[in-house]
């Protein structure tokens, strides 16, 4: 019995890489290694460019000290700080005046302190006094002090408030004009305002001065505090 064998296929020839291929692969590998090392180490530090400062002569230094600008006006002098000297503020410190209070206007007393008056169907206690005056009459400060407020009030019209120190304040209302502004200093007996008829809900109507006196926010009876009229 015969056996048949097919002829073996010829083996393919395996080509070896050439010198150019090996050189190119080694070159690329070198580049990859260099890039990897640089990336891991980071950028190399650049040397600092240190330029020596120019020399200053003693004459130039003296001239710079002489021509130095003066300090600001509000700067404290070192000697003053060491000795505890502190500049005073512009706002004066008020103390209760020793002189007696005076009446801001001459006239008939129309409504007294704590008198009961009616507005519509409501009864109210009057704070301060209402003094009858002539139209456009001027009034004076009852004590020396500083004007703390000048405003339009819904009840009493144009009003001025003066702080006299020691917790004392006075109010002047139903005015036509105020001669001083907030922050101004006034003297006792100095003309401060002109009376009008701006009050709408006070105990009186027409030309009169509404005058009130307070101590630490509590209303006092001016008749009891001021010398008899």
Image (cartoon, grey):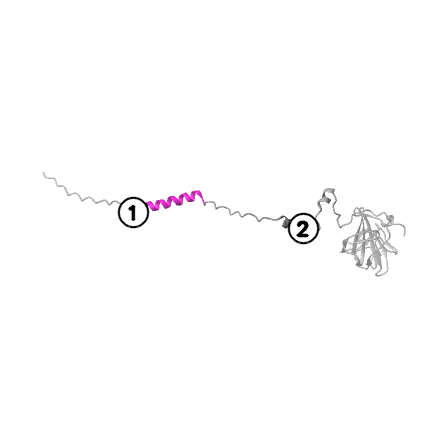
Q: Residue at x 42, y 44 (%)?
A: 38
Q: Residues within 10 Å of mark 2 (few under 14, many from 20)?
A: few
Q: Nearer the viewer, residue 36 or 94?
A: 36
* Magenta stretch contains residue 41: yes
Q: Residue furthest bottom?
A: 135
Q: Is 148 displayed left or right of 66 in the figure?
A: right
Q: Residue at x 34, y 46 (%)?
A: 27
Q: Which mark sits nearer the N-terminus, 2 or 1?
A: 1
- Can the viewer see residue 30 in this picture? yes
- Can the viewer see residue 121 in this picture? no
* Magenta stretch contains residue 39: yes
Q: Is 83 displayed left or right of 116 in the figure?
A: left
Percent from the top left, x then y, of residue 80?
73, 45
Label 2 residue SS: helix
Percent from the top left, x then y, of residue 33?
38, 43
Q: Is residue 49 above or below residue 134?
A: above
Q: Residue furthest left?
A: 1
Q: Which residues are magenta?
A: 20-42
Q: Residues within 10 Å of mark 1 (few under 14, many from 20)?
A: few
Which quadrant: the N terminus?
Answer: top left
Label 1 residue SS: helix
Q: Residue at x 67, y 50 (%)?
A: 66
Percent from the top left, x then y, of residue 59?
64, 50
Residue 21: mark: 1
Q: Nearer the viewer, residue 11 or 224?
A: 11
State the residue position of label 2: 66
Q: Nearer the viewer, residue 36 or 181?
A: 36
Q: Nearer the viewer, mark 2 or mark 1?
A: 2
């Amino acid at each position: 019995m015969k056996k048949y064998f097919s002829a073996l296929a010829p083996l393919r020839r395996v080509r070896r890489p050439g010198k150019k291929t090996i050189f190119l692969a080694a070159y690329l590998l070198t580049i990859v290694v260099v890039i990897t090392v640089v990336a891991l180490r980071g950028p190399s530090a650049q040397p600092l460019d240190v330029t020596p400062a120019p020399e200053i002569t003693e004459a130039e230094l003296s001239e710079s000290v002489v021509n130095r600008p003066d300090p600001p006006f509000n700067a404290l002098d070192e000697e003053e700080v060491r000795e505890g000297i502190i500049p005073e503020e512009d706002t004066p410190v008020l103390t209760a005046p020793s002189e007696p209070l005076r009446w801001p206007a001459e006239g008939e007393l129309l409504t007294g302190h704590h008198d009961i008056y009616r507005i519509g169907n409501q009864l109210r206690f009057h704070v301060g006094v209402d003094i009858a005056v002539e139209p456009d009459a001027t009034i004076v400060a009852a004590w020396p002090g500083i004007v703390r407020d000048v405003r339009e009030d819904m009840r009493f019209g144009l009003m001025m408030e003066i702080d006299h120190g020691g917790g004392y304040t006075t109010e002047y209302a139903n005015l036509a004009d105020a001669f001083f502004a907030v922050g101004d200093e006034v003297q006792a007996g100095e003309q401060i305002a002109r009376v009008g008829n701006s009050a709408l809900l006070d105990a009186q109507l027409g030309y009169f001065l509404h005058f009130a006196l307070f101590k630490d926010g509590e209303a006092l009876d001016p008749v009891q505090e001021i010398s008899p009229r």
